[in-house]
Amino acid sequence: MKNVLFAGLHPESDEPVSLNECDSQLFSADEFCTLLVRCRANGVKLGFMRHAAANEAMDRMVSQGVKKPQQLLDQWRSEGCNERFGAGYLVPDKVLNSFQWET
């Protein structure tokens, strides 16, 4: 998954928020936009989405299935959230099986 969705992006590690290491990766706002486009193109949904900020008052989290992630990202950015964004990725089995695995 990282080789397809995260290719060319520069994720930063954060404290794990789930058992899936991909879910603990954070991206700049522009790179997260790119990631959302790739998710949509590959049939990947978001189980949660978050914004991590130096000022905790700017932290955001939607934890119950994100229906319109780009719209939510745009809303958060309009509220001044422009630091690091992350998500939990729900990859359908048929999509996951289509990704090429490195050996």
Image (spheres, rainbow, N blue to C red):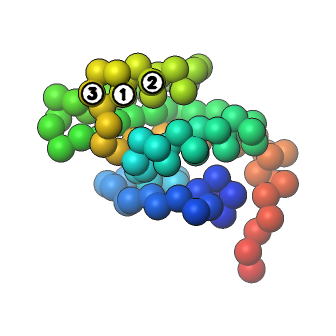
User: Does the CB distance between marks 2 and 1 fall below 8 Å?
Assistant: yes
Q: Is residue 19 visible?
A: no
Say what amino acid the circle numbered 3 marks: Gly
- Residue wearing tag 2: 74
Q: x, y (%) of residue 41?
A: 74, 39
Say what amino acid the circle numbered 2 marks: Asp
Towards the viewer: 46 or 93: 46
| Residue appearing at x 59%, y 57% in the figure | 6
| Residue appearing at x 57%, y 44% in the figure | 34
User: Which quadrant is home to the N terminus?
Assistant: bottom right
Left or right of 31 in this view: 36: right
Label 1, label 3: how many angstroms apart (C-alpha)? Answer: 5 Å
- Residue wearing tag 1: 77
Say what amino acid the circle numbered 1 marks: Arg
Q: x, y (%) of residue 86?
A: 44, 43
User: Does the CB distance between marks 1 and 3 fall below 8 Å?
Assistant: yes
